[in-house]
Amino acid sequence: MKRVAIFAHYDGDAVIDEYVLYYLRNLLMVADRILFVSDGALAPTETAKLAGLAELVATGRHGEYDYGSWKRGLSLIGDGIGSWDEIILANDSCYAPVFPFEDAFSRMAGVACDVWGPTGYRDREGLKFLNSYFLVFRRTAFDSADFWEFWSGIRPRVSKDEVVGEYEMGLSRMLLARGYRLATLVPADRDDLPVHGDYARRLMVMHRSPWLKVSLFRDNPMRVPHLGDVLADIDRFYPRRLIDAHQRRLTKEDDPAHYHFWLGAFRWSWRDGRTLRIIGRTRRDRWWKLYVQLFGLTVFAFVLPLARRH
């Protein structure tokens, strides 16, 4: 199975971080060739880090987010596309691999599909779209006019929300509408859990998923409680020092306050689509405003004082 990977990179400090190099080094376990595209200018000292790991395709701001970087990588492959069995699209939004990439590819080898990714979004009617931090296209998908038509339409967008709506969801909608089969590594009965929340504690370990979102540690958007403890668990599978060093550069803190929430965001779902959520909010690490979200309506519940955990 011959695979080419296109890796989309962006860093506000124009750095190729150590966690990215670790990702690339392990990606070579499942890819024969890696094309590296950065949405930003990189100094020669940075691009030199790619020696032996990836071929630099392009640097410089293009404003098309990851999809623009993937488009540039695909254009380089061009007519040589026929020599590959699978195309991998990856980006630097994850720490990986927490578990070996080889295991994930081995498990998906027997799944009848044209495109797969780690996770996606489902409703009662089935899988609606794949999350695009890692996508694998088989020949049945990329050796078609549909595939290339989509990439030719990539243009600059002003926000990440536009990219998600038009490209992440749009790509899956196009594929499904034209009869392509999509699949996820994480089973359907667990795929509705938040990537940022239960994924860290449950999905990652239960299903040996190699990817862990950078934004979990940068922002903790799902208010995962005791995130520092999660880091300690991860250290058994992935070098925690890479996460600590990267997060220290991003947050300018050794021990960010969002590592120490006592309560998180909880969700219960019914088969008919109803959802109950309890959402915690904090102010100065001392007060939790608790809300209950029932059937889409958020209602204030109460305020609870909590001391920050040290």
Image (cartoon, helix red, strand yellow):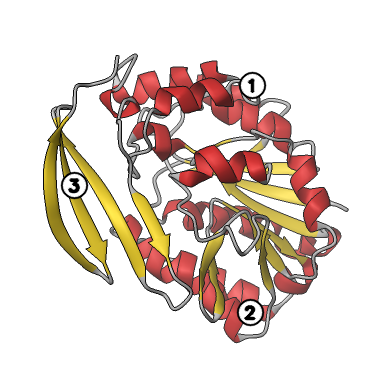
Amino acid type assigned to the residue bearing label 1 in the image: Arg
Rendered position, 188 above or below 100: below
Rendered position, 187 above or below 8: below
Q: Are marks 1 and 2 in contact (CB under 8 Å)?
A: no
Q: Secondary structure at mark 1?
A: loop
Residue 197's tag is: none
Q: Could you tell me which quadrant the C terminus lies in?
A: top left
Callout 2: few (<14), some (14-19), or many (20+) C-alpha neighbours within 10 Å? few
Residue identifier under label 1: 236
Q: Position of residue 286 (x, y in %)?
A: 14, 27
Amino acid type assigned to the residue bearing label 2 in the image: Asp
Residue identifier under label 2: 146
Residue identifier under label 3: 290
Q: Of the residues under marks 3 and 1, which one precedes in the sequence?
A: 1
Rendered position, 253 above or below 227: above
The answer to whether residue 64 is left or right of residue 3 is left
